[in-house]
Image (cartoon, helix red, strand yellow):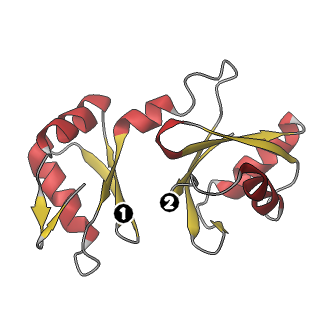
Amino acid sequence: LCVKALPPLDREIEEDVVHELGNVVEGVTRVKYQPKGWVEVEFSTHRLAALARRQLVPGNVVLFESVEIKQVDWADPEGDSVGQDSQRKVISVRNLPSSTNHLRLGDLFNNLTGGQVSGVVRSGNMVLVTFCTQEGAKFAMDRSFNLVMDGNRLE
């Protein structure tokens, strides 16, 4: 399985992630960090991976008391395109002031892209903006340099 978490699991030691996931689901044997914040999780059997996917998909799992699982996809057995389709439709925006409603950011990107935003999720000062198409996400990335919201430059 491939897991997308907020904030990204990029500072934790892989063994710690295996242990933490093992507290929530059964059969985790190894994790491998992937580009753009994805973590590939290997299971001892396909059956345990399928059971884990059902447990993790609802998004109500918190790891390390602060990391929320936001997305779970099947990993590509070839290994190189893990979560690629989802990644290309989602952009991460940092430095949004905590006092700012994240839906305003969704409205801003909707205006930039002509209504391409399909979802907005916030965790701390990071916001994930999901677009209807890969082209919408790319267009938003191309047009969003130097955006400022409530005094903060968005990253």
Measured as percent of width and height from the top left, residue 34 is found at 57, 37
Q: Nearer the viewer, residue 32 or 112?
A: 32
Query: Mark 1 belongs to which amino acid?
Result: Met
Query: Image quadrant for the C terminus?
Result: bottom left
Residue 6, numbered circle:
2
Query: Mark 2 belongs to which amino acid?
Result: Leu
Q: Nearer the viewer, residue 111 or 15?
A: 15
Assess disc 1: are there few (<14), some (14-19) or many (≥20) residues with their C-alpha within 10 Å of its C-alpha: many
Measured as percent of width and height from the top left, residue 60 is found at 61, 67
Q: Is residue 67 visible?
A: yes
Residue 101, placed above or below residue 154: below
Measured as percent of width and height from the top left, residue 87 is found at 43, 37
Which residue is at a point 16% across and 59% down the rendered structure image? 107
Q: Where is residue 103, by image quadrant?
A: bottom left
Q: Are marks 1 and 2 in contact (CB under 8 Å)?
A: yes
Residue 126, numbered circle:
1
Q: Is residue 114 visible?
A: no
Q: Residue furthest bottom?
A: 99
Give the CA separation, mark 1 to mark 2. 8 Å
Assess disc 2: are there few (<14), some (14-19) or many (≥20) residues with their C-alpha within 10 Å of its C-alpha: many
Which residue is at a point 57% across and 66% down the rendered structure image? 67
Which mark is first along the chain, 2 or 1? 2
